[in-house]
Image: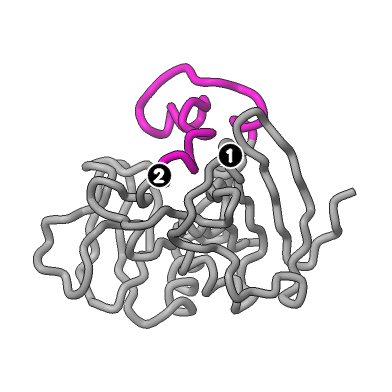
């Protein structure tokens, strides 16, 4: 059965999923790159980005799990690029070059229509301007029974959490303090929404926490 899940999402100790002042030079905001350093040296991450080798262990296990059975992605517009407002042209095609690491259909939430972009390696970006429910339905249709993964950002995850639509949320809490930026859980009552912590594992680089809707609490 297809699930909607968040996996491998970096979070600071003070609860931010991105730092302040996101820009072309700082896609995750100032200091935000530290949220994902736990993943960069893992075997799966290296393979996804055209490298070789890489580390095994707890962090690798969670990165490998994050890409299992994913048939489509949903991204907030900030996760696609730094362009704001109406699309000025078709020049910007994402942060990742000609061969993004997704290799499946990706549905980008936006208020401004844009034609789909077909990239190398099986990734096609589709731009959805009629809300989170429409994006989810299109992603599920494209996934053909496999899972739909939300890549972020924090505002997009909050919307799907508030609607009780996310089945599983894996966050990797990094030893980073950002002070400000994009908060993940502000305004959400997770227990009231039915979420329970079902897994908690620490590595030298991050604490991995899994929240499951309707799950049994970790012992």
- Residue 173 position, x and y percent, is 61, 45
* Residue nearest the viewer, comparing 52 with 27: 27
Whether the magenta-drawn stretch holds residue 76 is answered as no
- Count numbered badges in the picture: 2
Disc 2: which residue: 31
Which residue is at 30% across, 69% downward? 127
Q: Is mark 2 on a helix, strand or loop?
A: loop
Marks 2 and 1 sit apart, C-alpha to C-alpha, by 12 Å
Most extreme residue toward the top is 53
> Which numbered disc, 2 or 1, marks the residue that appears first in the sequence?
2
Mark on residue 132?
A: none
- Residue 184 position, x and y percent, is 55, 63
Image: magenta residue range: 33-61
| Residue 72 in sight from this viewpoint | no
- Residue 174 position, x and y percent, is 57, 41
Q: What element carries label 1?
A: loop
Image quadrant for the N terminus? bottom right
* Residue nearest the viewer, comparing 78 with 185: 185
Which residue is at 65% across, 25% downward? 57
Q: Residues within 10 Å of mark 2 (few under 14, many from 20)?
A: some
Residue 5's image quarter? bottom right
Which residue is at 55% across, 21% downward? 55
Answer with left or right where residue 200 lies relative to residue 217.
Answer: left
Instruction: Specify the color scheme.
Output: one colour
Q: In this view, does 191 lie above or below 103?
A: below
* Residue nearest the viewer, comparing 132 with 11: 11
- Residue 34 position, x and y percent, is 46, 39
**Magenta-drawn stretch, dominant element (helix, strand or loop):** helix
Whether the magenta-drawn stretch holds residue 55 is answered as yes
Disc 1: which residue: 175
């Amino acid at each position: 059965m297809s699930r909607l899940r968040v996996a491998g999402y970096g979070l600071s100790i003070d609860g931010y999923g991105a730092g302040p002042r996101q820009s072309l030079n700082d896609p995750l905001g100032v200091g935000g790159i530290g949220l994902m350093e736990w993943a960069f040296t893992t075997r799966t991450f290296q393979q996804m980005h055209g490298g070789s080798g890489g580390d095994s262990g707890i962090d690798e296990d969670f990165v490998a799990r994050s890409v299992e059975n994913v048939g489509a992605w949903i991204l907030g517009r900030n996760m696609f690029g730094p362009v704001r407002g109406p699309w000025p042209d078709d020049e910007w095609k994402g942060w990742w070059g000609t061969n993004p690491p997704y290799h499946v259909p990706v549905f980008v939430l936006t208020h401004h229509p844009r034609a789909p972009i077909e990239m190398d390696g099986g990734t096609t970006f589709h731009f959805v301007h009629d809300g989170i429910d429409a994006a989810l339905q299109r992603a599920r249709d494209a996934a053909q029974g496999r899972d739909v993964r939300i890549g972020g950002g924090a505002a997009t995850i909050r919307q799907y959490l508030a609607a009780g639509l996310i089945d599983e949320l894996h966050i990797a809490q990094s030893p980073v303090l950002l002070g400000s930026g994009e908060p993940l859980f502000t305004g959400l009552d997770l227990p009231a929404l039915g979420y329970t912590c079902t897994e908690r594992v620490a590595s030298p680089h991050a604490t991995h926490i899994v929240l499951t809707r309707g799950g049994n609490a970790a012992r």
